[in-house]
Image (cartoon, grey):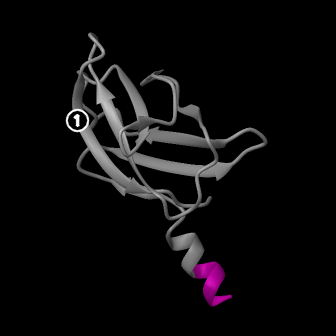
Amino acid sequence: KAIEQAKSKTAKVVNSKDGLTVFVKTATFGSTSELVLDNNKLSSIYKNYQFFLGNKAISKVESITNSKTTLFPVQKVGTEVVIKFLGQDKKVIKELKIKLSGR
């Protein structure tokens, strides 16, 4: 039970300053990520986002309004990735490092 409780505590990554929560789980093809955004805190200049592992993109560019995307190849829990938030012109405005957690 202690392990299950520890897992549930790490099941989400929260950056309350930016109003962002990220859930990640393994899917049939790659991994699925889900962003939960607090639109009152998230800057309205963020129009798109993309996940990276090092300098390699592991997701396509998604609209900030599309909360789910596929990460490929499959990413393991604990892997550190970067979410890049992009403006209307698809230029990076902010980068946020997170460790992937299971849901």
Q: Quadrant of residue 7?
A: bottom right
Farthest residue, direction front: 55
- Residue identified by numbered label 1: 94
Please tell me whether residue 3 belongs to the stretch shown in magenta: yes
Magenta residues, dominant SS class: helix
Looking at the image, which residue is at 42% across and 37% down? Answer: 56
Q: Quadrant of the C terminus?
A: bottom right
Extent of the magenta region: 1-5
Looking at the image, which residue is at 57% across and 50% down? Answer: 24
Looking at the image, which residue is at 65% across and 79% down? Answer: 4
| 62, 20: nearer the viewer | 62
Q: Quadrant of the N terminus?
A: bottom right
Residue 30 falls left or right of residue 96 = right
Q: Position of residue 43 (x, y in %)?
A: 23, 30
Please tell me whether residue 68 belongs to the stretch shown in magenta: no
Farthest residue, direction right: 28
Label 1 crowd (10 A; few <14 / some 14-19 / many >=20): few
Which amino acid lies under the numbered mark 1 shown in the image of this protein?
A: Lys
Q: Position of residue 34 (x, y in %)?
A: 55, 41
Looking at the image, which residue is at 29% across and 34% down? Answer: 40
Q: Position of residue 37 (x, y in %)?
A: 41, 38
